[in-house]
Amino acid sequence: MPVLNEERHLAAAVEHVLAQEYPGELEVVLGVGPSSDRTREVADGLAAADPRVKVVDNPTGRTPAGLNAAIGASTHDVVARIDGHAMMPSDYLRVAVETLEETGADNVGGIMAAEGTTPGSGPWPPP
């Protein structure tokens, strides 16, 4: 997970990954860039609270460098690319890995349904 200036969303994104309905082992590797907010502190706190979360440096702050740093520090055969503000369905990883195994594909993905929050007003789009 490459992250830069994700203080507001990082904890929720990591919680979504860790709460996946996936039968295998999970780890979240955060490639943290030089943020102008408290992203690094949030990332370090998440790693201190859960051994499945690991923090690596991404000195350039660029997404490809953050992905490379995170993938290089990962310990599993399957890597899921997740954004620092992502909220995915609870079965996302299970379905993706099942699809990889069933099809022999090198890469699978899903449809992104953009949802988020606006400052002070809660979820967007509204229910």
Image (spheres, rainbow, N blue to C red):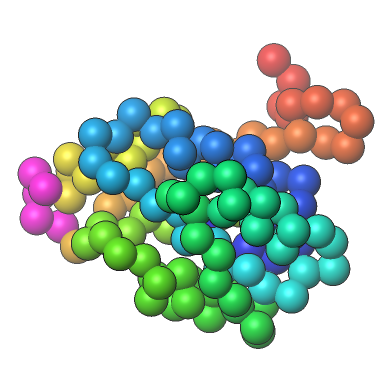
Determine the residue positioned at 51% across, 45% down. 50
User: Residue 42 appears at what percent x and percent y?
Assistant: 71, 53
Determine the residue positioned at 33% across, 41% down. 93
User: Residue 83 appears at what percent x and percent y?
Assistant: 55, 54
Count of numbered labels shown in the rendering: 0
Depth check, front residue: 104 or 68: 68
Position of the C terminus, as image quadrant, is top right
99 relative to 85 in the view: left or right = left
Q: Residue furthest bottom?
A: 60
50 relative to 79 in the view: left or right = right
112 relative to 37 in the view: left or right = left
Q: Is residue 43 visible?
A: yes
Determine the residue positioned at 88% across, 37% down. 119
| Up/down of 35 relative to 18, above or below | below
User: Residue 34 appears at what percent x and percent y?
Assistant: 74, 75
Determine the residue positioned at 41% across, 29% down. 90
Q: Quick check: is 45 in the magenta stretch?
A: no
Q: Quick check: is 102 in the magenta stretch?
A: yes
Q: Which residues are magenta?
A: 101-105
| Up/down of 22 relative to 30, above or below | above
Q: In the figure, residue 89 lies in which quadrant?
A: top left
